[in-house]
Image (spheres, rainbow, N blue to C red):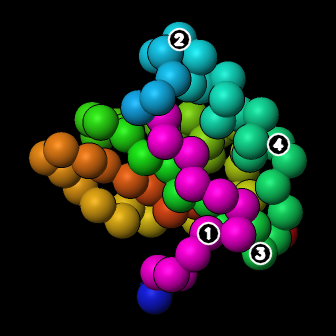
Amino acid sequence: MDQPVSYPGGTIDLRLHRPRERLGLIDQLLATVQAGEDVLLVFSAPPQRLPDHIHSRFPGRFALNPVSQGPAVWSLWVQPLR
């Protein structure tokens, strides 16, 4: 699957937010994005538990694809499916 050049839903750099705020921010964002509004989430460490959280909270709504995998920056392309 080709990665988009831009992300219509935006790029959220979670490195700029406090750890305890990140999950709530992600949940708010994903509750509102629509099909075609791909989002790039940027992290300073691997988002190990995030894919399971997203799939359990929003079953069948998103495809998740790693874009960069460290060591300094990790990012995840979140693609709404419907």
Residue range of the region highlighted in magenta in the rendering:
3-14
Of discs 1 and 2, which sits in the foreground?
1
**What distance separates the C-alpha of mark 3 from that of mark 2?**
28 Å
Which disc is residue 20 wearing?
2
Q: Tell me which numbered mark, 3 or 4, is placed earlier along the sequence.
A: 4
Secondary structure at badge 3 equals loop
Q: Tell me which numbered mark, 3 or 1, is placed earlier along the sequence.
A: 1
Name the side, left or right, on which 24 lies relative to 15.
right
Vertical arrangement, residue 36 with respect to residue 74, above or below: below
Amino acid at the residue labelled 2: Arg
The answer to whether one can see residue 64 in this image is: no
Foreground of the two, 16 or 66:
16
Instruction: Tell me what residue is drawn at x 59 percent, y 17 percent.
Output: 21
Secondary structure at badge 2 equals helix
Amino acid at the residue labelled 1: Tyr
Please give the residue where the numbered disc 1 appears in the rendered image.
7
Magenta span has 5? yes
Of discs 4 and 1, which sits in the foreground?
1
Instruction: Tell me what residue is drawn at x 51 percent, y 23 percent.
Output: 17
Residue at the extreme bottom of the image, as rendered = 2
Q: Tell me which numbered mark, 1 or 2, is placed earlier along the sequence.
A: 1
Instruction: Tell me what residue is drawn at x 44 percent, y 56 percent.
Output: 76
Please give the residue where the numbered disc 4 appears in the rendered image.
31
Amino acid at the residue labelled 4: Ala
Please give the residue where the numbered disc 3 appears in the rendered image.
36
